Image (tube, helix red, strand yellow):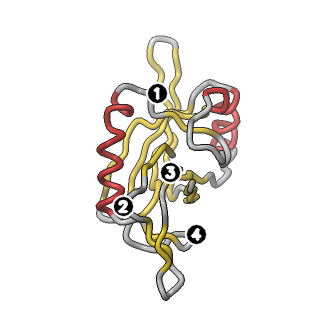
Amino acid sequence: MILTDTFIIENPELIVESRGGTTKKVLRGVFGRCDEKNNNGRIYSKKILAREMERLAESMGERRLLGELDHPTHDAVKLSNVSHLITKLQFKNNELLGECELLNTPAGQVAQALVEGGVKVGISSRGMGTLTQQMDGSKHVNEDFKLVTF
């Protein structure tokens, strides 16, 4: 089952870098939290997220970890919808800090305009896996979870 969870980027920081006539726009902020219930009532363990971040590290290092605008319902990234490139993921306690480069694609230009317009944008984790429902109504993400992108 596809699992998509949206998280409003808290205290987003837009960094504009200019080098050799090109401008790069980087969005940095909290992409999610672990070991606590999110907006969808799901709980992602730090152990599972750390494992998945390690699995995706090579793609990130090779500038291949792409993300899309909106909430796709498929498990593969469609290049025609790409808006950003994930460049950094790390933990600070239970917060998942992320950084993404907003690309100069049609979808990336929309994302840039929203951020520059002061819109509170969200970032969604997208992955495949199953859930275990707890008595309190929370849903724990199981070990079979595979993170696709943000």
Q: Earlier in the sequence, mark 3 or mark 2?
A: 3
Q: CA distance from mark 3 to mark 2?
A: 12 Å
Q: Are marks 2 and 4 in contact (CB under 8 Å)?
A: no
Q: Earlier in the sequence, mark 4 or mark 3?
A: 4
User: Image quadrant of residue 112?
Assistant: top right
Q: Which residue is mark 1?
A: 17
Q: Residue at x 41, y 35 (%)?
A: 87
Mark 3 surroundings: few (<14), some (14-19) or many (≥20) residues within 10 A? many
Mark 4 surroundings: few (<14), some (14-19) or many (≥20) residues within 10 A? few
Q: Position of residue 147 (x, y in %)?
A: 44, 48
Dot 2 amino acid type: Glu
Disc number lying in front (3 or 2): 2
The label shown at residue 40 is 4
Which type of secondary structure does the marked residue at label 2 adopt? loop
The label shown at residue 49 is none
Which type of secondary structure does the marked residue at label 3 adopt? strand
Q: Which residue is mark 3?
A: 127
Residue 59 falls left or right of residue 1: left
Which type of secondary structure does the marked residue at label 4 adopt? loop
Q: CA distance from mark 1 to mark 4?
A: 35 Å
Q: Position of residue 115 (x, y in %)?
A: 63, 44
Q: CA distance from mark 2 to mark 4?
A: 18 Å
Disc number lying in front (4 or 3): 3
Task: Give 141 or 9, whichever is nearer the viewer.
Answer: 141
Q: Position of residue 99 (x, y in %)?
A: 43, 42
